[in-house]
Amino acid sequence: MKFTLLPIALLVATVVASPVVGKNDKTDPSFCERGRKLCEIASSWEDCSDLYIKSMEACKATGCIQWFVDPLKHCYDKKYTPTA
C-alpha cells in the first residue's frame, strides 16, 4: 500500500508545483499591465530610496517597457560615488 501512495503523492506534488503555461508570457496583456503598475508604484516613493530602487528593478525585470536609458543610473551614480 505504501508503494502505491508514494507515486500518487509525487504525481500530485509535481502537478501542483508546475508553472501555469502563459501566466508570465509577455504577450499576455495582464502581465504587462502588472508591470506598468510596478512602475507607478516606484514613482510614488522618494527618488533613489531603497523602496524606489526595488520597485523600479521589479518594473525593469518584467521586460514590458523598453528603456533606452537605465532609469536607475542616476541613483547608482549617487549611491556609489566615492568620496575623497
Image: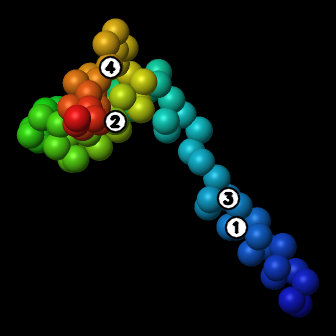
Specify the amino acid type for callout 4: Asp
**Looking at the picture, does residue 15 appear above or below residue 67?**
below
Residue on which disc 1 sits: 12
User: Do callouts 1 and 3 mark residues in contact (Cβ within 8 Å)?
Assistant: yes
Between marks 4 and 2 in the image, the one whose residue lies nearer the viewer: 4
Q: Is residue 4 left or right of residue 69?
A: right
Three-letter code, disc 1: Val
Give percent across and percent down for residue 29.
37, 25
Q: CA distance from mark 1 to mark 3?
A: 5 Å
The answer to whether residue 75 is seen in the rendering is no
The quarter holding residue 71 reads top left
Q: Residue at x 16, y 43 (%)?
A: 49
* N-terminal label among 4 and 3: 3
- Placement of 54 over or under 56, stated as above or below: below
Residue 22 horizontal side relative to residue 33, left or right: right
Q: How many marks?
A: 4
Given residues 74 and 71, the one toward you in this image is 74
